[in-house]
């Protein structure tokens, strides 16, 4: 979900809407993002997306940054268009795929933009018309929704339409939109920290799903956080090793990673590789990534005859 800053209209005309959808369609190529439901309102949008071959943040940045630039040029304005970062909530497939599809597609009817289901089914700026077969947008995945309603497409569309009608009386549902998410709280790291302390903030609902789904998701997030910390510590340790070798060998620390071919730098990189791999337990791939060279090059250096100073330097680590 994304909203205009101070309720600014983010879609003023069809040119704006087509520009946004064109960018969204581009991100659906090669299944980088998979879109099930969407709607464009005057001052906000809703998207129901499965992340594919590319992280959500990457795709959304490409969509929104390009859109804002074009929007500002078209309407002769400058500055921010969207209110903070877009709001994202992780959802379990069942039952939320259908619940959210219905909720999102009913937005124009609830807001009075259209006055009937017939008009909603033909409204060009939501995925409802696409599922109903009234508007063609090849980038939207309609099959994932319709398969819940039967194998025959015609009958499935009829049952889907009835399902959407039944949701009209539900009105606005904060339980399907995160209840007013506060993004400034700090993302997943903050959520994990609060949960470890037994605190759950009502306005910070980033997950829709069963308790099992939530626990599984949080466990995965914690493991990613631990892996990030491990990688950070490794980089910090390698940075310290570079500084030590630079001091011992009398060269500038940035030069060691510069790719220079002087005798002094080649020697320093050999010392670095042999100490990191043979004394500190790093893999050739990790050292290669750090130095910006190939793994085979690092392994060749590390496995060559050990320099006499390696034993002395290893005692200083």
Image: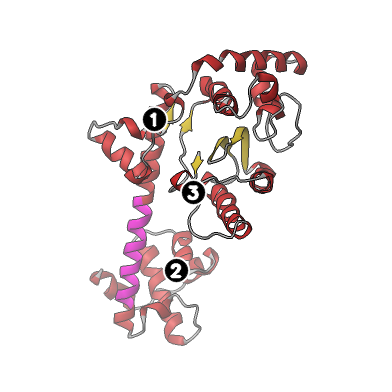
Q: Residues within 10 Å of mark 3 (few under 14, many from 20)?
A: many
Q: Are marks 2 and 1 in contact (CB under 8 Å)?
A: no
The one nearer the camera, 138 or 144, is 138
245 vs 236: above or below: below
**Residue at the location (62% across, 44% down)?**
32
Helix, strand or loop at disc 2?
A: helix
Q: Provide the residue designation for mark 3.
A: 82
**Residue at the location (41% across, 36% down)?**
220
The one nearer the camera, 110 or 262, is 110
Q: Position of residue 256 (x, y in %)?
A: 42, 77
Question: Of tags 1 and 3, which is closer to the observer?
Answer: 3
Q: CA distance from mark 2 to mark 1?
A: 55 Å
In this rendering, would 22 be left or right of 281?
right
Q: Quadrant of residue 215?
A: top left
Question: Of tags 2 and 1, which is closer to the observer?
Answer: 1
156 vs 198: above or below: above
Q: CA distance from mark 1 to mark 3?
A: 19 Å
Is 231 covered by the magenta stretch?
Answer: yes
Q: Position of residue 43 (x, y in %)?
A: 53, 41
Helix, strand or loop at disc 3?
A: loop
Q: Provide the residue designation for mark 1.
A: 179
**Residue at the location (50% across, 42% down)?**
2
**Residue at the location (24% across, 72% down)?**
316
Q: Provide the residue designation for mark 2.
A: 302
Q: Quadrant of the C terminus?
A: bottom left
Q: Residues within 10 Å of mark 2 (few under 14, many from 20)?
A: many
């Amino acid at each position: 979900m994304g909203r205009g800053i101070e309720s600014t209209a983010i879609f003023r005309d069809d040119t704006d809407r087509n520009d946004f959808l064109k960018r969204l369609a581009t991100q659906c190529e090669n299944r980088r993002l998979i879109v099930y439901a969407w709607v464009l309102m005057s001052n906000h949008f809703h998207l129901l997306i499965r992340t594919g071959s590319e992280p959500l943040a990457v795709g959304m940045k490409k969509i929104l940054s390009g859109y804002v630039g074009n929007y500002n040029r078209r309407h002769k304005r400058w500055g921010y268009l969207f209110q903070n970062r877009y709001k994202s909530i992780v959802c379990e497939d069942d039952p939320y795929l259908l619940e959210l599809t219905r909720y999102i597609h009913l937005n124009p009817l609830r807001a009075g933009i259209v006055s009937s289901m017939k008009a909603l089914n033909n409204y060009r700026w939501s995925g409802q018309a696409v599922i109903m077969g009234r508007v063609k947008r090849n980038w939207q995945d309609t099959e994932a929704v319709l398969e819940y309603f039967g194998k025959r497409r015609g009958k499935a569309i009829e049952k889907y339409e009835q399902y959407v009608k039944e949701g009209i009386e539900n009105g606005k549902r904060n339980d399907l939109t995160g209840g007013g998410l506060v993004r400034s709280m700090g993302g997943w790291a903050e959520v994990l920290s609060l949960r470890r302390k037994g605190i759950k903030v009502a306005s910070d609902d980033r997950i829709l799903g069963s308790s099992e789904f939530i626990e599984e998701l949080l466990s995965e997030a914690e493991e990613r956080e631990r892996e990030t910390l491990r990688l950070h510590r490794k980089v910090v340790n390698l940075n310290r090793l570079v500084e030590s070798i630079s001091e011992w060998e009398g060269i500038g620390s940035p030069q060691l990673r510069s790719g220079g071919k002087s005798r002094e730098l080649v020697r320093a990189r050999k010392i670095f590789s042999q100490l990191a791999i043979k004394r500190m337990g790093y893999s050739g791939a990790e050292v290669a990534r750090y130095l910006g060279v190939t793994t085979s090059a690092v392994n060749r250096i590390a496995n060559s005859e050990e320099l006499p100073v390696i034993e002395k330097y290893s005692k200083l680590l």
